[in-house]
Image (spheres, rainbow, N blue to C red):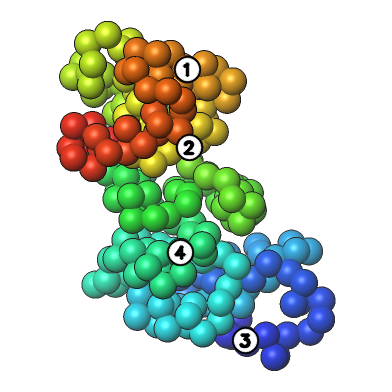
Amino acid sequence: MGNAHDGGLTFAERRKFRVFLVDDHPALLLGLGGLLHREPDLTVCGTATTAWAALAQITALEPDVAVIDLVLGAQDGVELIKDLRAQRPALPLLVYSVHADGRQARRALRAGANGYLVKDEIDNFVPAVRAVLTGQRFLSAPIAARLAQAAFAESNDQVSPQLSDREAAIYRLLGHGHDVKHIADLLGLSVKTVYTYCDRLCAKLAVPDQQALWLKAVREAMRGDCPPL
């Protein structure tokens, strides 16, 4: 599974979404590559086992999506995510990690990851890649549950005493950069229901519309008035 520039690809390969894989276990890279090569619209354009190599090769190869482990020997995958987000802000980044705890997921998502898949959910690997490729968020079920629990746990220290637990949780998630669809997925609600809660938040917090609500939530999160998830 060698690295290849566009010039070395066939016409059919150029029409596929190009995936770059980063993991310090070569056997896993080989296995993931095999899964992707079975898909008619996906191909592996390169792999790396270190953050340094990944940063250089992704810059050169310009893949459509990168899949990144958080533990890369002595290097930290979260730092690689930050570097990639600075260099290629629009590149979809999917974390594929053995860590199923909320703390590591929060670090990765804050750094700029678009999705977080736990490694024991191999059946969700291709769907997760497709999700982030199409601009969606993807979270493993245990990660989504932990993030939602954290949001509700913080509702005891509400940003405003007039907010319900659900409203406070949604407000915090808005403040930490989650969009309405992602919040709906995290909390097990419909998108329409989340929009209804946002309308209620606008009324209770005296802001004119949902865009202003989002800006207020983000500003408060940056100041630390919205506790981190």
Q: Is residue 156 above or below residue 87?
A: above
Q: Nearer the viewer, mark 2 or mark 1?
A: 1
Which secondary structure, mark 4?
A: loop
Q: Is residue 53 left or right of residue 73?
A: right
Q: Tell me the quadrant of the picture where the C terminus can be found.
A: top left
Q: Amino acid at mark 2?
A: Asp
**Which circle's residue, 2 or 4, is located before the other in the chain?**
4
Q: Is residue 220 left or right of residue 131?
A: left
Label 4 Cα neighbours within 10 Å, binned few <14 / some 14-19 / many ≥20: few
Q: Position of residue 223 (x, y in %)?
A: 18, 40
**Which circle's residue, 3 or 2, is located before the other in the chain?**
3
Which secondary structure, mark 3?
A: loop
Which secondary structure, mark 1?
A: helix
Q: Amino acid at mark 3?
A: Ala
Q: Is residue 36 left or right of residue 223?
A: right
Q: Amino acid at mark 1?
A: Asp
Q: Amino acid at mark 4?
A: Pro
Q: Nearer the viewer, residue 179 or 10?
A: 179
Q: Is residue 49 in view from this perspective?
A: no
Which residue is disc 4 drawn over? 89
Q: Is residue 30 left or right of residue 175?
A: right
Q: Which mark is residue 179?
A: 2
- Residue at point 57% right, 25% down? 191
The residues bearing labels 3 and 1 have C-alpha atoms spaced at a distance of: 50 Å
Which residue is disc 1 drawn over? 199
Which residue is disc 3 drawn over? 4
- Residue at point 49% right, 77% down? 58
